[in-house]
Amino acid sequence: MAKTKAVAVLALLGVVSAWLLVPWKTPSLRISGDGAPGVEAAMPGQIDVSVGDLDVVLLRRAENLRHMEDVARLCRGRCDAALTSLYELRPGGGRKILVFDLAQIGGAQALDRGAPLPDPIAACLADRIAQEATGIYRRVSNASCVPTQRWLPVLPYGL
C-alpha cells in the first residue's frame, strides 16, 4: 500500500513538473529598449529559443528600470549587473528575461549623443543573447562587452 502511494506521489510530481517546465507554445524572442534596432539587426539569423520565452530589455541606465514595473517587480532591486538574467518559473514553461545595463557596457554614451548603438557592442550583445537562448543558466566568460553577470531565479506567482 505504501509503495503504491509513493509511486502515485512521484507520478503526480512528474506531471506538475512537466506542466511548469514544458512550453505549451512555440517560445518567442522579444528585444526592447534603448538600442534595440541595432541589436536586432546584428542577430545571427534565426535563434533557437529552447528556454521558453526570451525577453531582452536594454536599459540606457539601470535607473530606467523603474519605468518598467513588471520587470522591476521581478528584479526586486537586484538587477545591478551589466547583465542580469532572470528565469521566471511559470505554468507552461519558463520565461527568461535578460536585463542589460548599457551604461556598464559602454553603449549609453553613444545613445546620449543621439547616435545608434555602436556596431561592436550591438554584435556582442546579439552574440550573448544567442548564447543565453540555449539554456536556463549560462555563465559565459568570453563576452568582453558584458563585464558582470547575475543570475536570479524567480518563483511563480510572486512567491
Image (cartoon, rainbow, N blue to C red):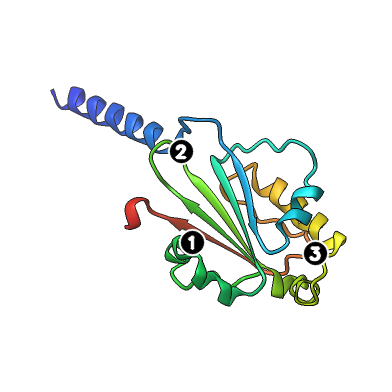
The quadrant of the image that shows the N terminus is top left
Q: Pointer 1: what residue?
A: 71
Q: Position of residue 12 (x, y in %)?
A: 27, 30
The quadrant holding residue 122 is bottom right
Q: Secondary structure at mark 1?
A: helix
Q: Secondary structure at mark 2?
A: loop
- Which class describes the residues within 10 Å of circle 1: few (<14), some (14-19), or many (20+)? some
- Which class describes the residues within 10 Å of circle 3: few (<14), some (14-19), or many (20+)? many
Q: Pointer 2: what residue?
A: 93
Q: Earlier in the sequence, mark 3 or mark 2?
A: 2
- In the image, residue 59 sits, relative to residue 96, either above or below, namely below
Q: Position of residue 127 (x, y in %)?
A: 77, 51
Q: Earlier in the sequence, mark 3 or mark 1?
A: 1
- In-image side of 68 versus 133 (left or right): left
The residue type indicated by label 2 comes to Gly
The answer to whether marks 3 and 1 mark residues whose Cβ atoms lie closer than 8 Å is: no
- In the image, residue 127 sits, relative to residue 145, either above or below, namely above
> Residue at image x 42%, y 36%?
92
The quadrant holding residue 85 is bottom right
- In-image side of 44 versus 136 (left or right): right
Q: Secondary structure at mark 3?
A: loop
> Residue at image x 48%, y 33%?
23
Q: Pointer 3: what residue?
A: 117
Report the front residue among 74 and 33: 33
- In-image side of 156 versus 143 (left or right): left
Q: Nearer the viewer, mark 3 or mark 2?
A: 3
